[in-house]
Image (tube, rainbow, N blue to C red):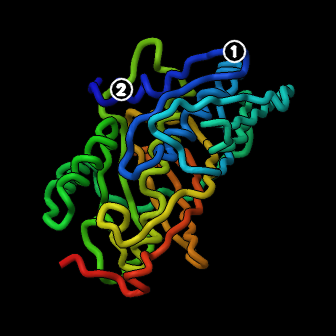
């Protein structure tokens, strides 16, 4: 296991300070606020710690209310909404400086047999043939070296490989609003930490990294790494369909059906390498063009 992955696991290991109340710490991100995937993952950890282990999470719905302060702890309060025979529901509110910054509802289900079908996995190259995210980042001369270091540090716990050039690598002309990324943790998970909830939490963490890329591609924008848009996640929903491991390759197939009114919508499916549909994801975010740039996309050349 890499040190970066161990650091991420430590970040997600919340301190319980009272029944149904947990405290998490933060770390700096690419932008000057807490990374949304971190808050969502920590909130899911808090919810999961109040649910029997034989009831894995099957869905979550969340709203990002305020930017998080990376220099302050986050307190997560869990409301035990329902404990039914098959389903368990939890609501989590994340608070900083006396104000809610994030709200999550999560549902957990005891395993049962049922109908089974899925959308087929789309074609994609073997992840082993693709450059790593860090290799791509360090190959771009147009990105500020300080930004490259921030990106590399923020994603060091994850082996994340774009199938095509990411928005910040090739921009200036609109492209198809579709992006594929292979990802897995940068190291194997084992021992006491190797629990089903952890794999779901880690996928939740990663899911916020690239989902709005397809919005940027549609408009030839490079994104936050090059400063031609500003924005943030607004809401996030995930459905966990089938078992998977976050330390094995997962294909994140993403697209954007719409952008309007300063908001962009991303939707995606996550497949295991052998073709099982594991997760569905939808997210809307604020995506604004800086006023001094207007609607015309800058060139990457």
Residue 30, image x, y percentages: 36, 50
| Distance from the alpha carbon under mark 1 to that under mark 2 | 24 Å
Residue under pointer 1: 18
Q: Is residue 290 left or right of residue 110?
A: left
- What's the residue at 68%, 43% (across, down)? 103
- Locate the N terminus by quadrant: top left
Relative to 93, 257 lies left or right: left
Image mark for residue 141: none
Q: Quadrant of the C terminus?
A: bottom left
Report if residue 129 is visible in the image: no
The mark found on residue 7 in the picture is: 2
Residue 270 rendering spot, x and y as whole percentages: 49, 50
Residue drawn at (42%, 64%), measured in percent from left and top?
A: 213
Name the secondary structure under disc 2.
helix
Residue at x 46% of width, y 33% of height: 26
Report the residue that reaches farthest toward the front.
Answer: 97
Instruction: Determine if residue 260 is in view.
Output: yes
Q: Position of residue 251 (x, y in %)?
A: 41, 51
Q: Examine the image and state in which quarter residue 47 appears.
A: top right
Which of pointers 1 and 2 lies earlier in the amino acid sequence? 2
- Measuring 61% from the left and 16% from the top, which residue is drawn there? 16
How many numbered markers are drawn? 2
Query: SS for tag 1?
Result: strand
Q: Quadrant of residue 123?
A: bottom left
Q: Nearer the viewer, residue 81 or 102?
A: 102
């Amino acid at each position: 296991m890499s040190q970066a992955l161990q650091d991420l696991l430590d970040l997600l290991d919340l301190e319980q300070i009272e029944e149904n109340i947990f405290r998490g710490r933060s770390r700096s991100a690419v932008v000057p606020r807490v990374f949304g995937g971190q808050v969502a993952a920590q909130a899911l950890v808090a919810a999961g710690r109040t649910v029997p282990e034989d009831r894995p999470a099957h869905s979550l719905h969340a709203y990002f209310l305020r930017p998080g302060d990376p220099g302050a702890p986050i307190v997560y309060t869990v409301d035990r909404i329902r404990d039914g025979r098959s389903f368990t529901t939890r609501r989590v509110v994340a608070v900083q400086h006396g104000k809610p910054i994030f709200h999550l509802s999560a549902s957990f289900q005891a395993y049962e047999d049922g109908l089974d079908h899925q959308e087929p996995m789309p074609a994609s190259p073997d992840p082993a043939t693709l450059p790593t995210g860090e290799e791509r980042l360090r190959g771009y001369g147009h990105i500020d070296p300080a930004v490259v270091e921030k990106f590399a540090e923020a994603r060091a716990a994850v082996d994340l490989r774009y199938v095509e050039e990411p928005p910040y690598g090739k921009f200036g002309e609109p492209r198809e609003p579709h992006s594929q990324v292979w990802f897995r943790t940068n190291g194997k998970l084992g021992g006491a930490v190797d629990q089903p909830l952890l794999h779901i939490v880690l996928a939740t963490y990663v899911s916020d990294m690239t989902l709005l890329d397809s919005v940027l591609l549609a408009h030839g924008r490079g994104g936050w790494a090059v400063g031609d848009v500003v924005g943030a996640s607004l809401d996030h929903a995930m459905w966990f369909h089938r078992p998977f491991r976050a330390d094995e390759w997962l294909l994140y197939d993403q697209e954007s059906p719409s952008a309007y009114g300063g908001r962009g919508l991303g939707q995606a499916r996550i497949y295991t390498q052998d073709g099982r549909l594991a997760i569905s994801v939808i997210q809307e975010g604020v995506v604004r063009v800086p006023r001094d740039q207007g609607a015309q996309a800058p060139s990457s050349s």
